[in-house]
Image (cartoon, rainbow, N blue to C red):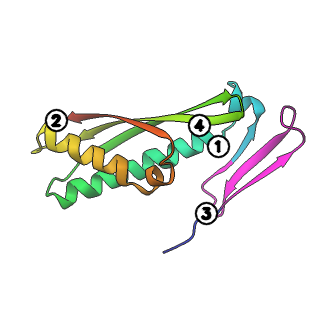
Amino acid sequence: MPIRKANAEWDGTLSKGNGKIFTDSGSVNAPYSFVSRFENGRGTNPEELLGAAHAGCFSMALAMLLEQSGFIPNKVMTTAQVHIGKEKNGFVISMIELETQCQINGIDEKTFAEKAEAAKKGCPVSMALASTNITLKARLLRE
């Protein structure tokens, strides 16, 4: 299996500095700063990228579990909201809220909910973040 690599560069102090996050594939090359991370400034931040990775991983895991059970999804759309806050010992990612919608026919709500929960628990990013509270709202869309 391939090993994926991402890089970050930071120049200056925490509050006045800025940096760049980039991947070896070239898919990501984005600026980040204190204000893009802890306020609403322009640029990306580690939590946004973590959310993108989690949403992508979960969506693929759900599609795989559905297919293995004989259900072919037309589309899986997932949002991940990553909560970061300051605690007494510093900043912490306290929760990730996954919300997914799936366009698929021929599956009942209970089976869909079971597959979505299994994907939440079993996707590699969820497993890497096992110490974080991860919630899931799963909605089945009919065509």
At 45% across and 54% down in the image, what residue appears?
Answer: 127
Circle 1 is placed at which residue position? 46
> Residue most toward the top?
40
Mark in front: 4 vs 2? 4
* Mark 4–mark 2 distance (CA, rounded to whole Å): 34 Å
**Amino acid of disc 3:** Ser
**Amino acid of disc 4:** Ile
**Amino acid of disc 1:** Pro
| Mark identifier at residue 142 | 2
Q: Is residue 126 left or right of residue 47?
A: left
Q: Helix, strand or loop at disc 4? A: strand
Going from N to C along the chain, the mark reached first, 4 or 2, is 4
Going from N to C along the chain, the mark reached first, 3 or 1, is 3
* Mark 3–mark 4 distance (CA, rounded to whole Å): 27 Å
Circle 3 is placed at which residue position? 25
Q: Residues within 10 Å of mark 1 (few under 14, many from 20)?
A: some
At 79% across and 45% down in the image, what residue appears?
Answer: 19
Circle 4 is placed at which residue position? 93
Q: Which residues are magenta?
A: 6-29
- The spot of residue 81 in percent (x, y) is 49, 33
Q: Helix, strand or loop at disc 1? A: helix
- The spot of residue 142 in percent (x, y) is 16, 35
At 28% across and 58% down in the image, what residue appears?
Answer: 64
* Mark 3–mark 2 distance (CA, rounded to whole Å): 36 Å
* Mark 2–mark 1 distance (CA, rounded to whole Å): 35 Å
Q: Residues within 10 Å of mark 2 (few under 14, many from 20)?
A: few
- Position of residue 34 relative to residue 6, above or below, is above
Q: Nearer the viewer, residue 101 or 97?
A: 97
Q: Is residue 140 left or right of residue 38?
A: left
| Mark identifier at residue 139 | none
